[in-house]
Amino acid sequence: MRLIGQIHVTPKGSVIQRNPSLWEKLKRSIGATVDLDTDRVRVELEATAVVEQVRRALGRLGVSNALSLIIDDTVIFQDTDGKPDDLPDLVLALSEHASVFGRGFDELRFAAEHEEAGLHLVIETRARTEHDQDEPAAIVSVGGRVRDLEPRPGESADDYRRRVEPLAKDAALFETARLQFESFVGRLEDALKTSMPEARVEQRHADARVVHGAPAEGAGAQEVNPTHPAYDPFLVYYPPSPLGVMLDMMLLTSFMHMLSPPHVIVMNPAGTMLGTAQEASANPDLLNADRGGDEGEDGAGDEGDDGGWGDDDGGDFGGDFGD
């Protein structure tokens, strides 16, 4: 089961103007008004300020484990050893690059992880100094897993099934995890509002999901874009386990036989919502319905429209942070 949340952060910015054409220059010379505004916005952000504001917000929630910091494709910090409480190390690494990135950047990616109440969480912040008017300047994505449902090091598929199958039948486990996750994302939103009082901070969603069907070959590329409905930051920093498909199948089977399934969203590998577990239990044919792959949630575009967020390689760190 995937726990996925997203918060949009939009500081005040200025509309980027294009260069006037020759005709427009002539019109201006005789006093005419020429509109040179584009649909792009520039925000004056400093890398050190963004990291410090997000770090303060995370600190309010007890988050102290850093995963990585990448600025304009330069790796500033990467925790390959799983060292705990290393956010100060990340801040120190950034201070050593302040002369290069302290006064501006194109894109910043800052990831941390946290464990609480049986949940394993990855919190990723992506910020850009230029963005479309209808996009946020920064996206804070949260991906989580129920720790007891994660495969253990060296655990075989048969052992995993025997251990997890009883848990998959416990509706209270999933409902509790969902509520705890919603609480965390809500508290993170409040903490970001406190540390970024000049910005508009809005939670877009926080929900629990299971995937119906195996992903197509090469489908992971569509999940690089953080505005894509299938985007899950957990999979960027922790590569998917082959046992994940088995878990989704066990959960769907269990939900179909529950009198009162938990409030979990069922989606296909492309990120299209098929319905809730309750709806699928009442109407199993819902899982086989083809509702198209381009119905994004929260206004997200289709797979071919990355909205300016999908041109980097989100898989650079896959496998580096495993147990």
Image (cartoon, helix red, strand yellow):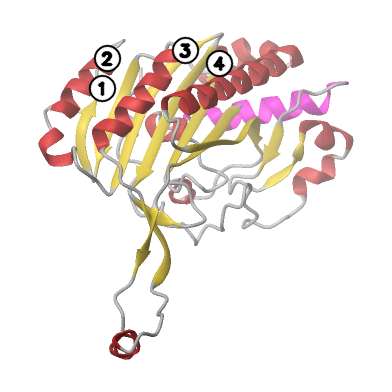
In this rendering, the answer to whether 66 lies above or below 207 is above
Disc 3 vs disc 1: Cβ atoms closer than 8 Å?
Answer: no
Q: Is residue 41 left or right of residue 187?
A: left
Which residue, given by chain and number where applicable, does mark 1 sit on?
79
Which residue, given by chain and number where applicable, does mark 4 sit on?
160
Amino acid type, callout 2: Asp
Q: In terms of sequence position, does the residue under pointer 3 or pointer 4 come before the other?
A: 3
Quadrant where the C terminus is found in the figure: top left
Q: In terms of sequence position, does the residue under pointer 3 or pointer 1 come before the other?
A: 1
Q: CA distance from mark 3 to mark 1?
A: 16 Å
Which residue, given by chain and number where applicable, does mark 2 sit on?
86
Say which element carries label 3: strand
Q: Residue at x 58, y 42 (%)?
A: 214
Amino acid type, callout 4: Tyr
Q: CA distance from mark 2 to mark 1?
A: 8 Å
Disc 4 vs disc 1: Cβ atoms closer than 8 Å?
Answer: no
Which residue is outermost to the front?
31
